[in-house]
Image (spheres, rainbow, N blue to C red):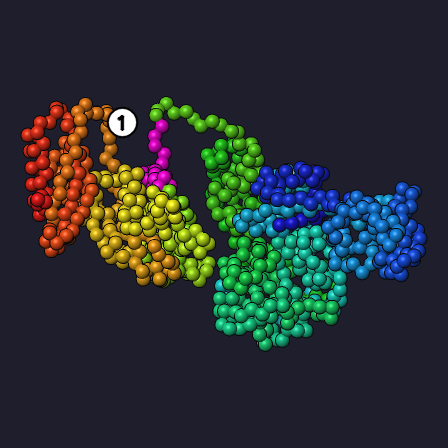
Amino acid sequence: MKFTLSWLKDHLETDATLGEIVEKLTMIGLEVESIDDKAALRPFVIAKVLSAERHPDADRLRVLSVDTGDGKPVQVVCGAPNARAGLVGAFAAPGTYVPGIDTTLSVGNIRGVESHGMMCSERELMLSDEHEGIIDLPADAPVGMPYAQWARLDDPVIEIGLTPNRPDCTGVLGIARDLAAAGLGRLKTPAAEPVAGKGPSPVTVSIAAPDLCPGFALRAVKGVKNGPSPKWMQQRLIAIGLRPINALVDITNYVTFDRGRPLHVFDASKVRGNLTVRRARDGEKVLALDEREYELTSDVCVIADEEGVESIAGIMGGEQSGCDENTTDVLIESALWNPANIARTGRSLGIITDARYRFERGADPEMMVPGLELATRLVQEICGGEATEAQVEGYAGYQPRTVSFPYSEVKRLTGLDVTADESAGILRRLGFGVEGSGETALVSIPSWRPDVDGKADLVEEVMRIHGVNEIAPQPLPASGTVSQRILTTLQVRTRLARRALAVRGMMEAVTWTFIPHDHAALFGGGAGALQLANPIAADMSDMRPSLLPGLLAAAQRNADRGYGDVALFEVSSIYEGDEAGDQRRVAAGVRRGTARMEAHGRHWSGNAPAVGVFDAKSDALAVLEACGAPVDKLQVVAGGPEWYHPGRSGTIRLGPKVVLGTFGEFHPKTLETVDVSAPLCGFEVFIDAIPEPKARATRTKPRLDLSPFQAVRRDFAFVVDKAVEAASITRAAAAADKKLITGVRVFDVFEGAALGEDRKSVAVEVSIQPVDKTLTEEDFEALAARVVENVNKQTGGVLRG
């Protein structure tokens, strides 16, 4: 939102300086983003051409003698057709930066004649697009005076950043109201005087879609003369970045920024019959004022006459009924529109206008009729004409909401000691109605504050006007006890999972929560409950049921750019349904090419092998171990979800029902569907499925017990059926003596005809750690017998002979 200092002072009587105003705006929540103090125009002075002689070597150039007010005429070479003796214009001396041509002047030599500066056109000073000649001022303009000061172009422009909850400050009046409430002056805006119309409007309006248009005010003005708007209005519009068009259009733009009340003006001679506010028909088209044709749907609200659409309601008028220099009769429209519908329409059509900006935030309903009266008066003052009576349709009047406001809430929520009288005074100055004299007041909300809904909002109003800077900084109170854990178990595990995967050489990625429908269906999703009603793109239609589609796409994008050996991970949420408990926390990762943990890429000593199922398994187990899962009790079973290769995937479980993760190489059909190329492997670990650790009696770490005896390793080779998993053998061997056996590791697998059909040999290394005494040979033999017996009983394996 931009405005000039003089524009603000039309509504605010104040002696505050520009710096004080800017500081106060920021302190009350209207953060100032930029200030243009018009310093760029200060070097330009009013100068008079004393003589204008033809250039000796160029017929189109003139050599001017220019009086700049210091008594020493300077020589200037000028090519403007209106350069002549006696002309008074704007002069720029050498060293001046000219914004319109982005040039800093120096003493020039033009066709052998020195030029000490230049006489400027309006475009060179960025005042308009006019550049056919230099600025021609009245003969009595004071020579030597700064041009910006004389032309009132030294008016600073302030730009504030508005949050979406402050529609009242989309007009200069609302900003002045806040500053006056903060003690920076007195609000002096008079109420809009009603215009006494003569007779009914020749064009009437009816509302066929009251849910989209809660109110509509219309008036005709006959016999207007459209032309350029006054200079003061043009200067203000140019200062805030708007291009003056004609008086009728400029008036609507001026009221839009002055009062936050968008308007529209129709050329009455181009309207056929009466107006109707209705929903557009599917496929209906309109040529808008931006000279683009828009195809409409039934979700769009329009203003139409008997021949078709004349305006996209609340957003942009139509070219067909636009005003031009031949307009003599006009219809002025001031209406209310459904904010959600305006936002949806503007987004779907891709139109951004000042009207949409205000209506989608919630324009003041009580300004509808006063806005019409103000615009009518300006039209009559500038363009003349005779107004008809105003027609107001649909508007039932504003019924203020009331909030019970205990003054003690200010202290409770902000820590500020603000008296009840001061709180009530602040609210009244902001336009709120305050009733009651006790500790609780009944506060009525003004029509221009749709964002205020409860007592916490009222506390915020008191706080920002009283002064956020008045909140004294205080140290956190020291507690006399040991600090308790702040993060939840899930938050801790999320951080531990990220760290564990980063240590394994993987790079963290952040992918979209939305994925294409066919990808969602492929990875177990695609349900209607998880499809977005209004996706930001066609290929982002579903909430993701898995992190893997996004990671696969990210890996492929890297490969397309020459980085094929990538390892990516993400720890985030997936969605199994639209209920509160259907959101899960998952750690997932993919490896591509040769991006193994040990090494990747080409090397003279040998190329690294491609990633495979066991790389994904190692990553998954590393995450589980880092998160505190009981790794020694986990079961790894063959097979996984259908997006993995059936023979090269696995599932990690804790018991028969609790699934903690899946891993594997991706199925070729999966890769084809998501349009990525192999080799690729990946995993998913469900962090929220890991059981909570058992509470310990103390937070102190347990005692470290180290055995003084030498550890011993024994090797066993068992012949088993091919279907028997190696993990079953290791578990059976470890269970032979949980006190002495500290580890079992597979180091060899052999298959051959000598073992028999569908048989294999699995060799394991058993680590034995004596605790109480040195074991004798008999002890080892007894332990070995228990190992063999346990493996035979649980897997059917026998020692290989």
Q: Is residue 511 left or right of residue 636?
A: right
Residue 695 placement (x, y as % from top left): 24, 33
Q: Residues within 10 Å of mark 1 (few under 14, many from 20)?
A: few
Q: Looking at the image, which is closer to me, 441 or 342?
A: 342
As drawn, 44 above or below 557: above
Q: Which residue is mark 1?
A: 701
Q: Which residues are magenta?
A: 483-504
Residue 640 placement (x, y as % from top left): 25, 54
Q: Is residue 145 left or right of residue 275?
A: right
Q: Looking at the image, which is closer to me, 120 or 167?
A: 120
Whether 486 is among the magenta residues is yes
Whether 489 is among the magenta residues is yes
As drawn, 392 above or below 98: below
- Secondary structure under badge 1? loop
Going by the numbered disc 1, the residue's amino acid type is Lys
Q: How many marks?
A: 1
Q: Residue at x 88, y 59 (%)?
A: 58
Q: Residue at x 10, y 38 (%)?
A: 787
Residue 542 placement (x, y as % from top left): 38, 58
Inspect this view and state whether residue 565 appears: yes
Residue 81 placement (x, y as % from top left): 86, 60
Q: Looking at the image, which is closer to me, 487 or 607?
A: 607
Which quadrant would residue 801 be assigned to in this image?
top left
Inspect this view and state whether residue 620 appears: no
